[in-house]
Image: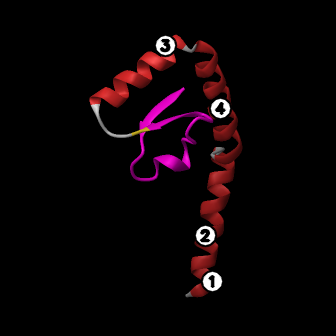
Amino acid sequence: PIIATNVGNTNEVVIDNYNGKLIPIGVESIKNQIIYMYNNPDTCKAFGERSRQMIEKDFDITKQAKKYGDLYNRLIESV
C-alpha cells in the first residue's frame, strides 16, 4: 500500500482510498496512517493489488516508450 502526501503529481499514481492514502503533510498524519494500515491488513492487501494493476496497465514500460515516441514524432512533424 501507498501512503503519500498530496503534493505535486502524487495523485496521478495514488488514488485516495483506492490504492493508497493521500494525506496532509505532517508527522501526525503519517503516524496515524501507518497505525491504520498496520491494523487493517485486508485494506493493505487490496491497496497493494490495485496499485499493481494500475502500474501494469498505465505505466508499462512499452506503453510509456510508445507515448514518448509518439510525442517526439508530433514534435518533429510540427517543426
Identify the disc placed on residue 52. 4
Residue 63, placed above or below residue 14:
below
Disc 4 versus disc 1: distance between alpha carbons? 36 Å
**Residue 45 drawn in magenta:** no
Disc 4 versus disc 3: distance between alpha carbons? 20 Å
Disc 3 versus disc 2: distance between alpha carbons? 42 Å
Does label 2 or label 1 sit earlier along the sequence? 2
Identify the disc placed on residue 77. 1
Disc 2 versus disc 1: distance between alpha carbons? 10 Å
Does label 3 or label 2 sit earlier along the sequence? 3
Query: Identity of the amino acid at label 4?
Result: Arg
- Asked whether 73 or 50 is in front, the reply is 50
4 vs 1, front mark? 4
Query: Identity of the amino acid at label 2?
Result: Leu
Does label 4 or label 2 sit earlier along the sequence? 4
Residue 33, placed above or below residue 6:
above
Is disc 1 surrounded by few (<14), some (14 to 19) or many (20+) residues within 10 Å? few
Tag 2–tag 1 contact (CB < 8 Å): no
> Could you tell me which residue is drawn at 66 percent across and 24 percent down?
46
- Magenta stretch: give its range: 1-22
